[in-house]
Amino acid sequence: MAQLEFPESKYARAFAPATVANVACGFDVLGFAVENPGDEVIVTENNSYGLKVTSIIGDGGKLPIEANKNTATVAINAMLNHLKADGGLSIQIKKMMPLGSGLGSSAASAAAALVATNELLGNPLQKKELVQFAMEAERIACGAAHADNVAPAIMGGFVLIRSYSPLDIVAIPAPASLYCSIVHPHIELRTEDARKVLKQDISLKDAINQWGNLAGLIAGLMRSDYELIGRSLKDVVAEPIRSLLIPGFDAVKQAALDNGVLGCSISGSGPSVFALSTSKETANKAGQAMQKALHEIGLDSDLYVSKVNSKGAHVLK
Ligand code: HSE
């Protein structure tokens, strides 16, 4: 893949990881970061005014370069407005993950852009404070300022959005030996479209089911209780509807469960499917079985296996 150019002016470079949003039962309120893939962004000072995307590598020409449409620049703009800072910045983006995949691609670019800009400005803000600006990028990308990708992309680990108004973000400790398999079928599903298919109201029965599982998952993570994590990785709100948009979903999920994972569901708004396991061996084996299930219906896919990424977005020296 082509490389980003290192500028002569003052610059900062950052990486931000892919994320699994929702984590089955936490629609819009829970997500976690993985180690790979991820995006890289270089932000460079220049002596003009405003933000300019000077190059995007790895997007197949699909992402907008207009500063008011690109998630990296929209996020930086929100941050600069907050800081009442102006001046000129050039932005280079290296996409190292698929678009429209359910891996938090727009979030990773925004997160890396914010961490790089914060570094360039001498780190006036804490990481957690950057989340609100990345949410503006999500608003542009899919019409909803959800934080369950951007918060873990910036902060790392599992992150709960306890409340959106006011924004209340809670980092959730997770067991050290939790592995994630993500299988990305080679189809594109836009988050905006995958949100439109959801019902606006859910029954009390489904709500009880969902919040029981979400509380169970949080307790399971905090207590390193793998059986509780497994029992709680269930989604009665989004998965029953969105799974219809993912060819072979039931077979992929069954393949994961047959190979010893704790649980399996849609990653973010899909089409990627994730599973959590207690060992790398299981995560690899299950991931390959999930890919095989897709292959049997004629779909190619990528497999990403990693630990939960506790570091989140960071500056690259
Ligand atoms: N919570 C968001 C959704 C995540 O499910 O629409 C999008 O990646």
Image (cartoon, rainbow, N blue to C red):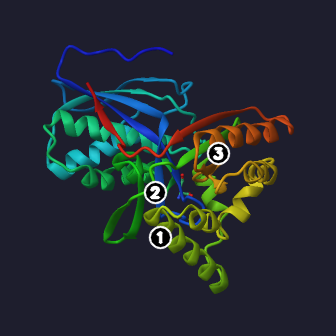
Of the residues shown, which amino acid type is indicated by label 2? Asp
Task: Estimate the x, y position of residue 133 in percent, counting from the top left.
Answer: 31, 51
Disc 2, SS: loop
Q: Which mark is residue 219?
A: 1
Q: Residue at x 32, y 53 (%)?
A: 131
Task: Estimate the x, y position of residue 232 in percent, counting from the top left.
Answer: 60, 68
Quadrant where the C terminus is found in the figure? top left
The residue at label 2 has a CB less than 8 Å from ligand 1: yes
Q: Earlier in the sequence, mark 1 or mark 3?
A: 1
Q: Quadrant of ligand 1?
A: bottom right
Whether residue 92 is visible: yes
Of the residues shown, which amino acid type is indicated by label 1? Ala
Position of 241 with respect to 112 (left or right) is right
Q: Are marks 1 and 2 in contact (CB under 8 Å)?
A: no
Q: Are marks 2 and 3 in contact (CB under 8 Å)?
A: no
Q: Residue furthest bottom?
A: 204
Q: Residue at x 55, y 64 (%)?
A: 27
Q: Earlier in the sequence, mark 1 or mark 2?
A: 2
Residue 244, picture quadrant: bottom right
Which residue position holds label 3?
272
Question: Disc 2 to disc 3, how far (Cα)?
Answer: 16 Å
Front of the two marks 1 and 2: 1
Task: Estimate the x, y position of residue 13 in percent, counting from the top left.
Answer: 29, 28
Q: Nearer the viewer, residue 101 or 229?
A: 229
Q: Nearer the viewer, residue 21 or 217?
A: 217
Q: Which mark is residue 148?
A: 2
